[in-house]
Image (spheres, rainbow, N blue to C red):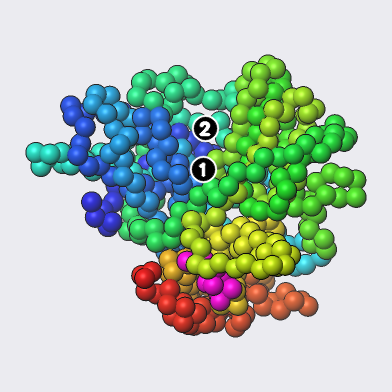
């Protein structure tokens, strides 16, 4: 299968997450089979009920007007003789951000509001899959997304790229990804209006996938003001899972935070800035039955958690720490354990921000500010094998470099043209702050940031990360 192959992008015609599936029958198991998958904004892929690979939050974030990344999976071990099913679940991410639920970055009221803020890349979520199978006698068989695929609404009814999700277990469809006809209301997919445009932007993923590094169980601290408070023991970026019980249809609200407030509850206020209203809303599908709820399309930055349920109704809580899969490049040890503890703090912070972009923080902005790619480059490169990461970040910068036609609103009813060749301070840039902010300056055209296209490349070269390891 060629990386340049494409299949139509299909849609359920919705701005909310959806399931998709395709049944087929095999007379024999193929010798080799692989799939190329792209679900925008985020997806997970399954064959015969089993999640393929150990990735989370595929595909990598990009400027979706310039590049959309497909992820390759070998699926030979997942296939069987007889009935099979390909299945995927697709959520919003940055492609079509859900700004109606939970926190979404915005300027605080004491600053002028940005007339060039986030704009959705599409009017519906989309999915493209193609599978190619090779048999011992030389025959090949291909399956791809088309209108014969079936779609259904997902129990995640809201998902926000800053960490909020609403999960309604009343909408679960048991067996949705198994090779049998599931319950629920299923409709034929439609070819997305943007299919041809997106197919022309198809590109392979060059950055390692995001994976779970470790699982942190939450330790119960106390109950206060009707909330059960838990501590994961360290601050990091991760995906939440909880096993809780309640009444069918009643909401259980979960709030993560990096610190505790004076009242002993998780404090989401970014001091001097804005409150970070990140929340998980869990809706049980049964009465008084423990059910497991897990984030699917987003993640949080947190150490503490407050659950609006008594501790006897919370079996456990867990934070799965995530990062783009990175091997260590170096080690450090010292007789004074304090230095090793400092290194652990630094590595955890690095891992929390090395996702599919190099984020500035896991909470407030989650933007790909570019100065870190040269200012922090030697620190990261002494510790981690990041050759493909810097290739991805530098590719994002090249995609972001402006042409003379690129323009923005000037906030006064006119248009503003920054000029050809400008390298913006963020790449990909989802919230272009192109106009100077009184007292703070111009965040879009900051030389110390955009110069990463040269200085980041220099560090990439000096550390030899442009070559294969060894």
Is there a contact, CB below 8 Å, between mark 1 and mark 2? yes
Specify the segment rendered in magenta.
377-385
Q: Residue at x 31, y 45 (%)?
A: 74
The spot of residue 405 in percent (x, y) is 46, 75
Cα–Cα span, label 1 and label 2:
9 Å
Q: Residue at x 67, y 78 (%)?
A: 442
Q: Quadrant of residue 413?
A: bottom right
Query: Residue 294 — which label?
Result: none
Instruction: Sort mark 2 into few (<14), some (14-19) or many (20+) by Cα contacts within 10 Å.
Output: many
Vertical side of 385 occupied by 285: above or below: above
Instruction: Name the residue that disc number 1 marks.
Output: 91
The spot of residue 4 in percent (x, y) is 27, 57
Query: Is 337 left or right of 379, judged from the image as shown?
Result: right
* Label 1: element kind: strand
Vertical side of 381 occupied by 196: above or below: above
Query: Residue 154 — which label?
Result: 2
Query: Which quadrant of the rendered structure holds the C terminus?
Result: bottom left
Q: Quadrant of residue 226?
A: top right
Can the viewer see residue 432 in this picture? no
Can the viewer see residue 154 in this picture? yes
């Amino acid at each position: 299968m060629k990386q340049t192959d494409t299949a139509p992008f299909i849609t359920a015609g919705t701005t909310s997450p959806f399931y998709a599936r395709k049944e087929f029958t095999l007379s024999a198991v193929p010798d080799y089979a692989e799939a190329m998958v792209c679900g925008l904004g985020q997806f997970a892929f399954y064959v015969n009920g089993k999640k393929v690979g150990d990735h989370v939050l595929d595909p990598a974030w990009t400027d979706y007007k310039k590049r959309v990344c497909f992820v390759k999976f070998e699926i030979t071990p997942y296939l069987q003789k007889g009935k099979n099913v390909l299945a995927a679940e697709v959520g919003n991410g940055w492609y079509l951000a859900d700004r109606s639920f939970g926190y979404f970055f915005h300027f605080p009221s004491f600053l002028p509001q940005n007339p060039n803020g986030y704009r959705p890349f599409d009017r519906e979520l989309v999915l493209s899959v193609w599978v190619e199978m090779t048999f011992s006698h030389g025959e090949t068989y291909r399956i791809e997304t088309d209108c014969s695929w079936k779609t259904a609404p997902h129990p995640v009814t809201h998902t926000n790229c800053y960490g909020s999700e609403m999960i309604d277990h009343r909408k679960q469809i048991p067996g949705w990804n198994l090779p049998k006809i599931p319950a629920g209301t299923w409709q034929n997919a439609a070819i997305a209006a943007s299919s041809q445009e997106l197919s022309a932007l198809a590109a392979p993923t060059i950055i390692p996938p995001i994976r779970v590094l470790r699982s942190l169980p939450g330790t119960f601290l106390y109950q206060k003001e009707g909330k059960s408070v838990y501590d994961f023991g360290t601050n990091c970026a991760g995906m939440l899972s909880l096993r809780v019980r309640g009444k069918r249809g009643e909401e259980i609200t979960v709030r993560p935070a990096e610190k505790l407030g004076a009242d002993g509850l998780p404090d989401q206020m970014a001091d001097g800035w804005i409150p970070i209203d990140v929340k998980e809303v869990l809706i049980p599908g049964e009465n008084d039955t423990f059910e497991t709820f897990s984030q699917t399309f987003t993640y949080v930055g947190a150490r503490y958690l407050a659950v609006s349920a008594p501790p006897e109704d919370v079996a456990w809580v867990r934070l799965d720490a995530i990062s783009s899969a990175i091997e260590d490049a170096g080690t450090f040890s010292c007789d004074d354990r304090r230095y090793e503890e400092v290194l652990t703090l630094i590595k955890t912070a690095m891992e929390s921000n090395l996702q599919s972009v190099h984020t500035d923080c896991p909470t407030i902005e989650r933007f790909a500010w570019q100065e870190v790619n040269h200012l922090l480059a030697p620190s990261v490169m002494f510790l981690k094998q990041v050759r493909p990461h810097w290739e991805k970040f530098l590719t994002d910068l090249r995609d972001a470099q402006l042409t003379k036609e690129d323009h923005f609103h000037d906030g006064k009813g006119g248009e503003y043209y920054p000029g050809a060749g400008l390298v913006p301070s963020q790449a990909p840039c989802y919230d272009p702050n192109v106009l100077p902010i009184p007292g703070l300056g111009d965040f879009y055209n900051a030389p110390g940031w955009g110069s990463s296209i040269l200085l980041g490349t220099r560090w990439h070269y000096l550390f030899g990360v442009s070559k294969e390891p060894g």
